[in-house]
Amino acid sequence: MKKGIIGKKIGMTQIFDEAGNVIPVTVIEAGPCVVAQIKTMENDGYEAIQLGFEEVAEKKLTKAEAGHFKKAGTTTRKHLKEFRLADITGYNIGDTVAADIFAAGEKVDITGITKGHGYTGAIKRWNLHLLGKTHGIGPIHRQSGSMGVIDPARIFKNKKMAGQWGNEQVTVLNLTVAKVDAEKNLIAVKGAVPGSRGSIVFIRDTVKE
């Protein structure tokens, strides 16, 4: 990884390229982030930078969190995230990382928490085929078929069944940066990004192209 930033998902819209083609994009408020800590091989066993995003009042943080920013000499931030970069020599504590570290046309990977749908049935969660409702099978409403077999008389592990749907960390690879507005700290990424509006996402340069 060469660079990364914390952002907030604003929502989806569309823009037009030079040929007049419509491009669906997700708009992300990326930064400005402050470098709150630098991890070194000598002290921590690995190299990384810790970024803080979205200013917050000190009274809304724990004593330990507030002390962390006080030690760094930076303003208090609501969200923290480490990025293990290939080279951290260009960063110092207190530096600001903004949206302009990315440019239009670059490929990025974006990590976010998907929308939570709560406890969901197998039909909606996994798109299983509905069990018949006639010919002596009913009365049944939106139920899947048999989950097991006669021998062995049990249900195998990892069977697709009802349960929690969503609210999990997902990374989408190889998204294209369509546009960058450095003045407003906005990045428009082609396609969809995991999470609801206002959720926090992590943007980094892609690991595979």
Image (tube, rainbow, N blue to C red):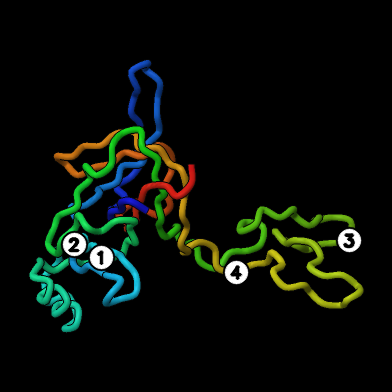
Q: Which residue is mark 3?
A: 136
Mark number, residue 163: 4
Tag 2's secondary structure? strand
Tag 1's secondary structure? strand
Q: Which residue is mark 1?
A: 50
When asked about the image quadrant of residue 73, the answer is bottom left
Query: Percent x, y for residue 26?
Result: 36, 41
Of the image marks 3 and 1, the number of the one nearer the N terminus = 1
Of the image marks 4 and 2, the number of the one nearer the N terminus = 2
Which residue is located at x 78 percent, y 74 percent? 155
Tag 3's secondary structure? loop
Is residue 144 left or right of 22 when viewed as pictured?
Answer: right
Instruction: Please name the amino acid that badge 4 sits on.
Output: Gly
Q: Which residue is mark 2?
A: 35
- Dot in front, 3 or 4: 4
Instruction: Please name the amino acid that badge 2 sits on.
Output: Val
Q: CA distance from mark 2 to mark 3?
A: 66 Å
